[in-house]
Amino acid sequence: MESTVDPRVERSRRVILTAALDVLGEVGYGGLTIEAVAARAGVGKSTIYRHWTGKLELVEDAIRTLKAAIVLPVEGTVRERVIQLLRQLACNATDTQWSTCLPAIIDAAERDPEVLQVHRRLALERRQVLIDLLAEGVKTGEVAPGTDVGLLAECLAGPIIVRRLMLHEPFEPDLVPKLVDQLLPPVPPR
Amino acid sequence: MESTVDPRVERSRRVILTAALDVLGEVGYGGLTIEAVAARAGVGKSTIYRHWTGKLELVEDAIRTLKAAIVLPVEGTVRERVIQLLRQLACNATDTQWSTCLPAIIDAAERDPEVLQVHRRLALERRQVLIDLLAEGVKTGEVAPGTDVGLLAECLAGPIIVRRLMLHEPFEPDLVPKLVDQLLPPVPPR
DNA sequence: CTGTAGCGAAACGGAAGCGTATCGGAAAGG
DNA sequence: CCTTTCCGATACGCTTCCGTTTCGCTACAG
């Protein structure tokens, strides 16, 4: 029973997955080739084929490494925490490797059901964080009772996603408070 | 000065552009090849190269043919017309060639600035229709004064786009009234 | 210390698509 | 009717990537 893996294997997997995300962001799913990933990773093609059966499995695995890097806000009113959360989303939507790869991932999801499931799960997890927060707001009275918090979460995140994918312009993080103002009527806390 | 074009040319362009959208939706931008488009269109490769310089210009042109097929609602309160508009968007987001090609277009926009501009303009035009409607609502008092109607428009359309691209599930058109309820407080018209 | 397992590099035949050129045929239109 | 234009098909050499195999080298594990 080996408890640990050969460090060479672990290192290979790491640099290859990183390279795969880089290439994916640059040329998209359809344009991604194993040779390009190998070259980018400074690795022999054979090493990739040793660990994955092909481009599809490699991309799936790479996407899985994109697990949300969000920090769950714990202080302040629900409203304040929503703002913090959306602000993080707005930043992530411009800067990160996630944002870079997002169009390619969405495209890949359209071609392959496995990729679709992986991406869908990531999106659902992210959404759930906001939903939980809003549900808490319903209890504290900061969110109107009877609200469909799932729908509200999508309304809050929507503009950030829409600007990134449809309008191809950034959502300025400082605009977040205004966004929240319009959807969460600034009821005085007590 | 020829006022009309040779009908053979017009027909060629038409079937090729249609085929290009079909192929684009099926294999994505990176996977699209001129040969596949030619085969799909029942046309010689040379005919394509006769009219376009390459894959990029062809795709740009094809996307331009996707001009919004929306019907501007003219009857009813602003609120009712917003519902009609969003309902159309929700339907288009599941059924149409636009929806099929959307992920590929977004991906293509990421690789090429020309495609980006074309897609951006289409998206802006669509958004403007909703904005104009909401601005009218501000005048009639159906939308709170001081509202950023651009932002509100994105909040309304957001959930539909988010579900299509991020959650990979349809936005049930019958859910639209509920969506509007949450964002446009159902103030009695008078 | 030694056997082994993972490594990078290189070469492979084959498949696919590139963009170009060249046909004969058919349709447009003067 | 007859010339011009556009067409489809086909073939071209070229490039890229496929997925596999082989081969020393080196770093790990026992």
Image (tube, coloured by chain):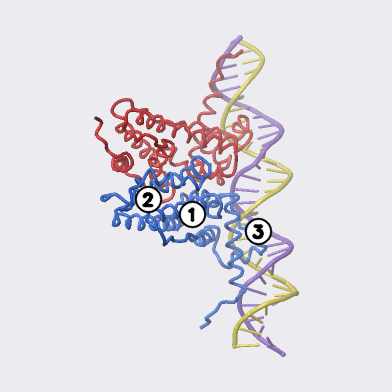
Chain colours: A blue, B red, C purple, D yellow
Q: Nearer the viewer, residue C30 or A88?
A: A88
For the residues beneath circles 1 and 3, the answer to whether they share a chain is: yes
Distance from the alpha carbon under mark 2 to that under mark 1: 14 Å
| Left or right: A26 in relation to B69 | right
Judged by depth in the image, the label closer to the viewer, 2 or 1, is 1
Residue at image location 44% in from the left, 47% down from the top: A177
Chain that bears disc 3: A
Q: Nearer the viewer, residue B157 or C13?
A: B157
Which tag, 1 or 3, sits closer to the chain's start?
3
Q: Secondary structure at mark 2?
A: helix
Q: Secondary structure at mark 1?
A: helix
Distance from the alpha carbon under mark 2 to that under mark 3: 38 Å
Q: Where does residue A42 sit, x and y in percent of width and height? A: 67, 63
Q: Where does residue A11 sit, x and y in percent of width and height? A: 61, 70
Tell me the residue that label 2 is attached to: A153
Q: Is residue B123 above or below residue A147?
A: above
| Amino acid, disc 3 | Arg
Q: Quadrant of residue B79?
A: top left
Which tag, 2 or 1, sits closer to the chain's start?
1
Chain that bears disc 1: A
Distance from the alpha carbon under mark 1 to that under mark 3: 30 Å
Judged by depth in the image, the label closer to the viewer, 1 or 3, is 1
Q: Which mark is residue A40?
A: 3
Classify mark 2: residues with Cα within 10 Å, few (<14), some (14-19) or many (20+).
many
Tell me the residue that label 1 is attached to: A88
Judged by depth in the image, the label closer to the viewer, 2 or 3, is 2
Q: Where does residue D20 sit, x and y in percent of width and height? A: 61, 65
